Image (cartoon, grey):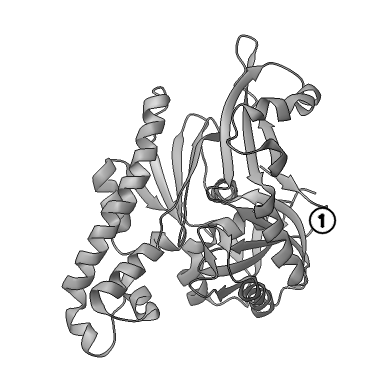
Amino acid sequence: MQLFSLGKSKSIVGLDIGSSSVKAVECAVRNKRVELLHVGVAPLPAEAIVQGAFLNSGAIVEAIREAIDSAGIKTKMVATAVSGHSVIVKKISLPSMTREELEESIRWEAEQYIPFDINEVNLDFQILHGAESEGQMEVLLVAAKKDLIDDYVQVISDAGLSPAVIDVAAFAVENAFEANYDLRTEDVVALVNIGSQVVNINIVANGAPAFTRDISTGGAAYTEEIQKALSVGWDEAERMKIGGKGEGEAQDVVPHEVEEAMRSVTDTVLGEITRSLDFFAATAAESRISKVYLSGGGARVSGLDAAFQQKTNLAVERLNPLARVAPASKLDEEFLKEIGPSLGVGIGLALRRMDD
């Protein structure tokens, strides 16, 4: 689903501006086969983006340029994604009407559901076909604050690129999932994308989003806790987080100290996620989640998938955004293996306009 279109383009770059890094992805579809042409990643300073706010636009612009340049991408048109507390996604029930009629009345309808001034948001909607009953229809309503959209448009433009599509991160992950996995209509799956500071939850039922929520927590919480526990730098704490070893004297205390720090954060993160899953289960009793797919850099946290499965008794699997994507021969296999779990949003965005 495409929420905000700012232009037309046949070739587009998926640009995932996360709070810890920028990822640039370019794909092509040939003979119904998805090919990964280019991928570039550039780190962001720890305080460049905090709780969705762009605090260091210059650093973000530089990271975008570095990601694009390191990948060798020449395409200028970009699709990016927003998330967090400035983005609202709601499934609402309305009297049956045509799309044209809904376009006329959507702002009035949205005012009842959006906790922001309607004049301060960009709105879009999708009629969920197949969900009509007794003169009612279900509509997926999305609103994002205009100042948030403006921030993304500004840094992309300052980097010398042209913003063509602005989407929602949770929907981009769904797009990547659909390109790589077979999903039966009756299946209900939870797509949980764990970024550095935000977790995107998207529960897909009947082939469409049934419940979407963003949570302000993520992989950075692990790094910060390890830093405090061991008095080590950010980079070393990052290595320990995903199962690497520390350096020098810290290495002797890694197993127990890191395990304790990780367990504490895992309990907190999983507690937040499972509360959302439980809320969905309580409000959609007929839809039972059959599987959870974890993506994002946080999905690489050692033991997180096993802990998730133990806590929820649900089948849990790491989503592979490259499962059915053929990498160009020039791309390094080890590099792709390392960053693969983090490419869900980028791959989903890169595929967003392929039919145009």
- In the image shown, does 191 or 101 lie closer to the viewer? 101
- Relative to 126, is 230 on the left or the right? left
Outermost top residue = 134
| Left or right: residue 285 compared with residue 29 | left
Query: Looking at numbered disc 1 in the image, what kind of residue is underneath it?
Result: Ser
Residue plotted at (68% across, 76% down): 65
Q: Percent position (x, y) of residue 277?
A: 38, 38
Quarter of the figure that contains the N terminus = top right
Q: Position of residue 309 (x, y in %)?
A: 28, 47
Q: Residue at x 35, y 46 (%)?
A: 272
x and y percent of residue 131 in the render?
Answer: 59, 21
Q: Can you see residue 262? A: yes
Question: Local crowd at mark 1 within 10 Å, few (<14), some, or many (≥20)?
Answer: some
- Asked which secondary structure carries label 1, the reply is loop
- Residue under label 1, please give it: 9
For residue 312, which quarter of the picture? Answer: top left
